[in-house]
Amino acid sequence: MPLPQLPSAFNLNYVMDTIYMRMGGLCRTVEVKGMDMATIIVYQAIPLYSKYFPKEDIVIINPSAQVPGREGFYYVKSDTPIMSVSRAIGLMDTRSTMGTMAGYNAGRNLSTVDTIQTMCSITGSATLSYTLIDHFNLNNYAAASTLPITTRFHPPNIVEFFPKQDYQGAGLVLFTMHKNTLETIGWNMADEFTTCAWLVYVQALKAIFKKYEKIQSIFGEINLDMEQFNSVESDLKDLQEKWRKYSPFRANNKRWYVA
């Protein structure tokens, strides 16, 4: 008998089958299953996981997206609920460019051509050392003299740009929830999401079983074994604390470096 193969993409069926096995579903009937189990995962596990490891969507601002009568306000769309706006792309930044050289050169009494020739020259260690320092100072000048472009998200689907001007054609990176099919979650994070789904599922079972913790029968009082449910809240908090610690280091996340 051939062994089953893992699916090419992480999906909801894999998570549900894993929970079935943990609940002993191979040899007994699981209390909450099917669509009820899927609803618990979609309504609780996906929003919680996406809060720390969201799906990233890139959208382009087009002319029809502007909010009528409000400068700098634009509608944005995504195939899943939008949680926040990560950053704008394709706009001005504080990296060294030809445009910022003019002001920097004026402070040093150098022409743009002279500075370019100096920065392009790499002959000798002294020249190279001067080039790196000059480049560093140029970036500092650009950072101090360039007005940064920031955004504010207005749920559920409006983004506001600062400063107020025309941003048609600009790109935005949106943080959104993952799809219900879970195909947007990579296999490298399968264990983390499955753990989250398992904990929210056990938490839902605890609320159900709590009502029937003690059952009266003709043979006397029957007490359900609730030991496996007692620590689910603390386990879920520990998982969130771990995600809160490590989510800033996820791939493609913007980082701050302080020298």
Image: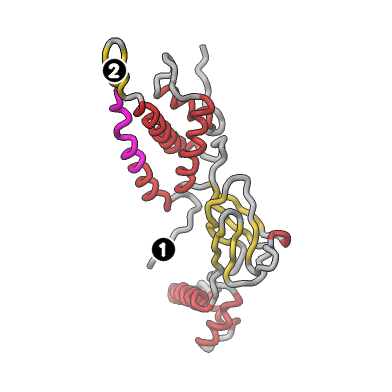
Q: Is residue 60 left or right of residue 115?
A: right
233 within the magenta span: yes
Numbered label attached to residue 222? 2
Asked which quadrant contains residue 165, the reply is bottom right
Q: Is 229 drawn above or below residue 128 in the view shown?
A: above
- Image coordinates for residue 253, horizontal then vertical, percent: 48, 54
Looking at this view, is 49 or 157 the one in front? 157
Colour scheme in use: secondary structure
Crowding near the residue tagged with mark 2, few <14, some 14–19, many ≥20 C-alpha atoms within 10 Å: few
Residue at mark 1: 257
Looking at this view, is 70 or 92 the one in front? 70
The residue that appears at 69% across and 59% down in the rendered structure is 65
Q: Is residue 190 left or right of residue 223?
A: right
- Quadrant of the rendering where the C terminus is positioned: bottom left
Count of numbered labels shown in the rendering: 2
Which amino acid type is shown beneath numbered disc 1? Answer: Tyr
Mark 2 falls on what kind of element?
strand
Mark 1 falls on what kind of element?
loop
Nearer-N-terminus badge (2/1): 2
The residue that appears at 33% across and 38% down in the rendered structure is 235
Asked which quadrant contains residue 30, the reply is top left
- Image coordinates for residue 221, horizontal then vertical, percent: 27, 17
The CA distance from mark 2 to mark 1 is 60 Å
Q: Is 249 drawn above or below residue 4 in the view shown?
A: below
Span highlighted in magenta in the image: 224-237
16 within the magenta span: no
